[in-house]
Amino acid sequence: MTDPNTTLSGASIAPMSTDDLDWVCAQEAALQAHPWTRGNFMDALGAGNEGWIMRVAGEPVAYAVVLRVLDEAHLLGIGVAVSEQRRGYGRRLLQHLCERAAKESATSFFLEVRVSNDAAQALYRGMGFDEIGRRRGYYPAGVGREDAIVMRRTL
Ligand SMILES: CC(C)(COP(=O)(O)OP(=O)(O)OC[C@H]1O[C@@H](n2cnc3c(N)ncnc32)[C@H](O)[C@@H]1OP(=O)(O)O)[C@@H](O)C(=O)NCCC(=O)NCCS
């Protein structure tokens, strides 16, 4: 079994626990126009999805939630604290999740991203994710709904 606590040159990535949820929910509220609630995170973790926290010098900087189904991994959410963005943490966290899924026999990593989210799309495209489709009106938006781009990276 892979050690779930992994150190990446000063940054550590470990499973998310309920003790992390105050910090996670505060980031989520700051980062997302339509944030997951504490209940959403509790439900996701309770359903067996993987939650991850990245820490640098012991302080949390990023989080992610991943759904695993057979040979597929799905990114349900990822966020990097506003003050810690553009330091490579998002890329490192997602790369770690891809490597971990591949070690555990996943062959594809899927995610959805808002068509308006240029930063996340740039991150994903730079990491080898390709657009494979769109879901019309997938996300709530300020006015009406917003499409999702569905992306896949072969592991
Ligand atoms: C998307 C997000 C996770 C990226 O995290 P990050 O740690 O800032 O990203 P990194 O520093 O690892 O950047 C990796 C690459 O992504 C791209 N990127 C990241 N932020 C970007 C931005 N604001 N504008 C354009 N490109 C960006 C760049 O290609 C970057 O590489 P570079 O710095 O060498 O140019 C972060 O902006 C975030 O938390 N956003 C709010 C939540 C969110 O949108 N989550 C995704 C939902 S699908």
Image: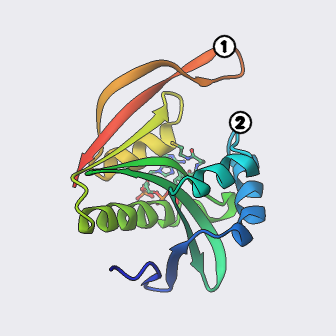
Q: Which residue is drawn at 39% across and 63% down?
A: 97
SS assignment at label 1? loop
Residue 40, disc? none
Q: Earlier in the sequence, mark 2 or mark 1?
A: 2
Q: Position of residue 28 (x, y in %)?
A: 70, 50
Horizontally, residue 12 falls left or right of residue 109, namely right
Q: Where is residue 40 in the image (x, y as percent from the top left)?
A: 68, 46
Front position in the image: 77 or 31: 77
Horizontally, residue 148 falls left or right of residue 142, namely left
- Which quarter of the picture shows residue 26? bottom right
SS assignment at label 2? loop
Front position in the image: 83 or 143: 143
- Which quarter of the picture shows residue 149? top left
Residue 33, disc? 2
Q: Which residue is drawn at 64% across and 24% down?
A: 140
Residue carrying label 1: 144
Is residue 65 at least partly visible in the picture? Answer: yes
- Circles 2 and 1: CB atoms closer than 8 Å: no
Q: Residue at x 53, y 58 (%)?
A: 64
